[in-house]
Image (tube, rainbow, N blue to C red):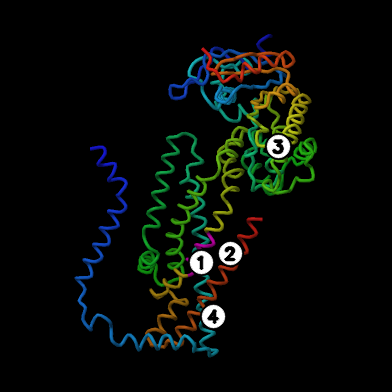
Amino acid sequence: MQQLNNIFELNNISKVYERKIAISSLSLTIKKGELVALIGPSGAGKTTLLNILANVLKSESGQLLISGVLSDKYNSGKKLAKKIGIIRQQFDLVGQLPVVHNVLAGRLVEWGFLKSLLSLIFPQEKELAKKALDRVGLLDKIYEKTSNLSGGEQQRVAMARLLVQKPEVILADEPVSALDPARAEDILSMLTKLVREENETLITVLHSVEYAKKYFDRIIAMREGKVYFDLPAEKVTDKLLSDLYDLKELN
Amino acid sequence: MNKISHSFDIHKKTILTLLLILAFIWSLFSVNWGPELVHTGGKATLAQIFESLFHPQLSSEIINLALIATWRTLSYAVAGMTLAIIIAILFGVLASGVLAKSELSRRFSKGVFRGILGFMRAIHELIWAWLFVASIGLTPYAAIFALAIPYGGILGRIFADIINDVPKEPIEALYSAGASRIQLLFYGYLPMAASDMISYTMYRFECAVRSSTVMSFVGLGGIGFQIQLALQDLNYNQVWTYMFFLIILVVLIDLWSNILRKRLVE
């Protein structure tokens, strides 16, 4: 029973890049419905960890269970896409297509070839796209060319795609790093709100400690490939944070 | 040793430039600098050609002939390009390797189809024209196939490169959203590559009109054939009439492609 509640279970995961250790024997569990922020200095291995969770990268050693199943078992993109959705910086969308197709791309996992081809001419399941765009406040831009949208709007389109894709867990890799503070807050509050409404799990790599404390339940801090601390957001103190970002090498 | 080769690396370009200049100077010695170097009657002919530039023959009979010939040349070019585009999209996508599942099949698909495209464009359209005239005779099909094959080869190669050069992030995002290879092609690669593909195709279409003109020298009708006949009669006034038709045709295509490109960018 306990196992079913864990969306991710990592046992002694290690990853090495050309003799440089990116992650060293890391163990973690992440429960369903948690909102986790991954913070830490540059080069701490946050994005590497996220890519391992996304099954994009394979770890050298250790074991990753996704919903209690070994990660190797998710060998097809379609199978994985129903479980995990990914949002990165704002360059994720196909700018030349209208917004509606970028949103409906979240349905490609369910659609066959002919239906997806037909949809490029007559958008299929348009109601679904409309509903998702309405929730991110972009319903009026549905037929706009995506590249004409601002950076913040494009991130909202990416969120609408995730709403249509309906994965169990969303992995976000610095989703607001290319945005100004006002838009960054707007995107983060919307993302966390939608994830809560959908009962999904969210793991986000973040640069800003302030946003991590404001919008997330649990903060995992990484340093030099290891977990430095793993605490509920309200228990993270300024002392811990200044130690985390200290420039001195750890022994 | 290492040092020497390093300093050679730096000066490689200069050494090559010097060698080429020397070769050029040396080649001048083998020229026979006599009065027969330039064709003596050439000056008069050149003047005649230049003069007739301002007096193209504009009789209704010639204009009528020029219109029909231009139309024929354009039809060959359009039909040839249409076939070339179909070949190029099919082979270009396969030569880009984006449909392949494994690394091995990707390499195989890239290698085989890039090879086929290379073979198609290695042979010039004029040679294809001779081959087709010899095999299927002086029919429009000979002209169309002779254009379609090398142009399909060139376009296919460029299409494959354009598809390979699209930004990777949106493709990865689509893949993680669960898109299959063929869905990636229609939702990612092709929309991102389309404007470059169309603008290159338009440029190639312009080239196809010129090629189709030259090809009619083998006897396949069209504006080139008329130019050839007029040249054999030393009737330069007629030659210019046909040339102006050709120029107008190319300029019109250029205008059309500009309008199309502008609409694509918006």
- Label 2 to label 1, Cα distance in Å? 9 Å
Q: Give the number of the mark in front: 4 or 1.
A: 1
Question: Is residue A7 at all visible to an observer of this figure?
Answer: no
Query: Label 1 lies in what chain?
Result: B
Q: Position of residue A207 (x, y in %)?
A: 65, 27
Label total for image: 4
Q: Which amino acid does label 3 sit on?
A: Asp
State yes or no: discs 2 and 1 in contact (Cβ < 8 Å): yes
**Residue displayed at 51% across by 49% down:** B162
User: Which residue is labeled 2 in the image?
Assistant: B257
Left or right: B181 with respect to A36? left
Q: Do labels 1 and 3 share a chain?
A: no
Quadrant housing the N terminus of chain A: top right
* Other residues around mark 1 within 10 Å, as few (<14) / some (14–19) / many (≥20): some
Q: Residue A180 carries which label?
A: 3
**Discs 2/3, front:** 3
Mark 3 vs mark 4: tell me if same chain. no
Given the image, what chain letter belongs to the residue carrying mark 2? B
Same chain for the residues under marks 2 and 1 in the image: yes
Query: Range of the magenta residues?
Result: B201-209
Q: Which sits earlier in the primary sequence, circle 4 or circle 1?
A: 4
Q: Would residue B14 be visible to someone looking at this image?
A: yes
Q: Whole-percent x and y of residue B156?
A: 47, 53
Q: Earlier in the sequence, mark 2 or mark 1?
A: 1
Task: Check chain identity for marks 4 and 1: say if they share one.
Answer: yes
For the residues marked 2 and 4, what is the alpha-carbon distance in whole angstroms? 22 Å
Secondary structure of the residue carrying tag 1 is: helix
Whole-percent x and y of residue B57? 50, 89
The x, y position of residue A200, in whole percent, is 72, 23
Q: Name the residue under label 1.
A: B206
Res. B181 image quadrant: top right
Residue of label 4: B67
